[in-house]
Amino acid sequence: MKYFTVICKSECYYSIMAKAKLITEEYDFQYICMDHSPQLLNFFKSNYSWQTVPIISLRDTENPDFEEFIGGYSDLIKWLEQEDNQRKIRPPSGESGV
């Protein structure tokens, strides 16, 4: 199963908007709040070469090595608008995702 990872800060407007979008669109995701982990947040920022939150990526429970970095909130919105990306996370009508 494909799901999103959102590394965030609780008071960040764009983190909140990303969470709201994923909830509204009924996507599976994990929301990892870094409010009390500044060193870990700096690790993620360095690891993804991304200096702001949220830091969003696509993961797969069936393939732990799979990760597609998406970016921040506006990148998520653009990513979700692309039909090819929709196929990555939602099977066509009539097909089971299992």
Image (tube, rainbow, N blue to C red):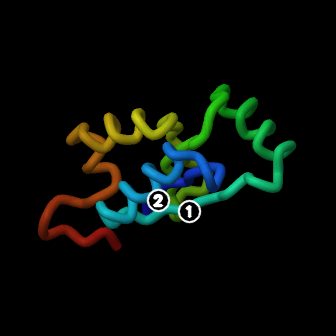
Q: Secondary structure at mark 2?
A: strand
Labelled pair 2, 1 in contact (Cβ < 8 Å): yes
- The residue at the point 49 percent across, 62 percent down is 29
Q: Quadrant of residue 26?
A: bottom left
Reading the image, the residue beneath label 2 is 3
Answer few, some or many: residues within 10 Å of disc 1's Cα (few below 14, many 20 plus, some between 14 and 19): few
> Considering only order in the chain, which callout, 1 or 2, is on the residue closer to the N terminus?
2
Q: Position of residue 74 (x, y in %)?
A: 40, 34
- The residue at the point 86 percent across, 43 percent down is 39
Reading the image, the residue beneath label 1 is 30
Q: Is 27 in front, or is 19?
A: 19
> Of the residues shown, which amino acid type is indicated by label 2?
Tyr
Q: Quadrant of residue 85?
A: top left
Instruction: Measure the alpha-carbon separation of dots 2 and 1.
Output: 8 Å
In this picture, is 17 found above or below 45?
below
Front tag of 2 and 1:
1
